[in-house]
Image (tube, grey):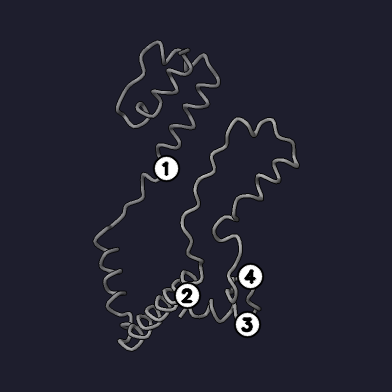
Amino acid sequence: MNGCTALSDRMIDVAHGRAEWTAVESAHLVDCADCAAEWRLVRAGATLGGSVRIDERAIAGRVASRLRAAPPVPLASRRRRWVASALGLAAAVLLSVAVWRTVPRSPAAEPVRFASELDGLDADQLAIVLEAYPEPLGAVMPDGAVGMSDLDADELEAVLDSFEG
């Protein structure tokens, strides 16, 4: 660590009176223009906000008086918000159950175990092996199932409105 870095590290403590410059450090501040400029900046920054005083009791009193003066939220409004939230949650549950019931039930596919023999196969032979395995679960929508991408703008808006309440 050179002299300038060591001096920079101590500037905050000296500016706040927690430390004092040594004779060597004071001489360095006189000789080094960069350190002298940094010291002037740190001293100026240390005085910023020194005259600001915060009266916590006065602020707390003003906040409390504003809260007392604010009109209370009517019970009917709170009840409407609760009912809207409950209806939105119920709609989400019903939609989840409807989608869950449309997912085909099939036994878990046995994991494919690739053997080293597949390395020697060409593209046509690999395609034949791939066709031998069933499609992954959920790759094909069952008859009558509707995805979000199948909805028109009005239907999609109705679904979103049910979530907003």
Q: Nearer the viewer, mark 1 or mark 3?
A: 3
- Percent across and percent down for residue 135 are 60, 56
Identify the residue at image location x=46%, y=69%: 100
Q: Earlier in the sequence, mark 1 or mark 2?
A: 1
Tag 1 near tag 2, CB within 8 Å: no
Q: Residues within 10 Å of mark 3 (few under 14, many from 20)?
A: few
Q: Name the residue tied to disc 1.
A: 48
Report the front residue among 44 and 155.
155
Q: Earlier in the sequence, mark 1 or mark 3?
A: 1
Label annotation for residue 149:
4
Q: Quadrant of the C terminus?
A: bottom left
Q: Secondary structure at mark 1?
A: loop
**Displayed quadrant of residue 154:** bottom right
Q: Nearer the viewer, mark 4 or mark 3?
A: 4
Q: Is residue 116 above or below residue 105?
A: above
Give me the C-alpha separation between circle 4 and circle 2. 16 Å
- Percent across and percent down for residue 3 are 46, 13
Q: Nearer the viewer, mark 1 or mark 2?
A: 2
Label annotation for residue 98:
2
Report the front residue among 70 and 133.
133
**Displayed quadrant of residue 141:** bottom right
Residue type of the residue flagged with mark 4: Ser
Give me the C-alpha separation between circle 4 and circle 1. 58 Å
Q: Earlier in the sequence, mark 4 or mark 1?
A: 1
Report the front residue among 155 and 108.
108
Q: Residue furthest top?
A: 24
Report the front residue among 86 and 112.
112
- Percent across and percent down for residue 30 are 49, 16
Q: Secondary structure at mark 2?
A: helix
Q: Is residue 11 above or below residue 56?
A: above
Label annotation for residue 154:
3
Identify the residue at image location x=36%, y=26%: 14
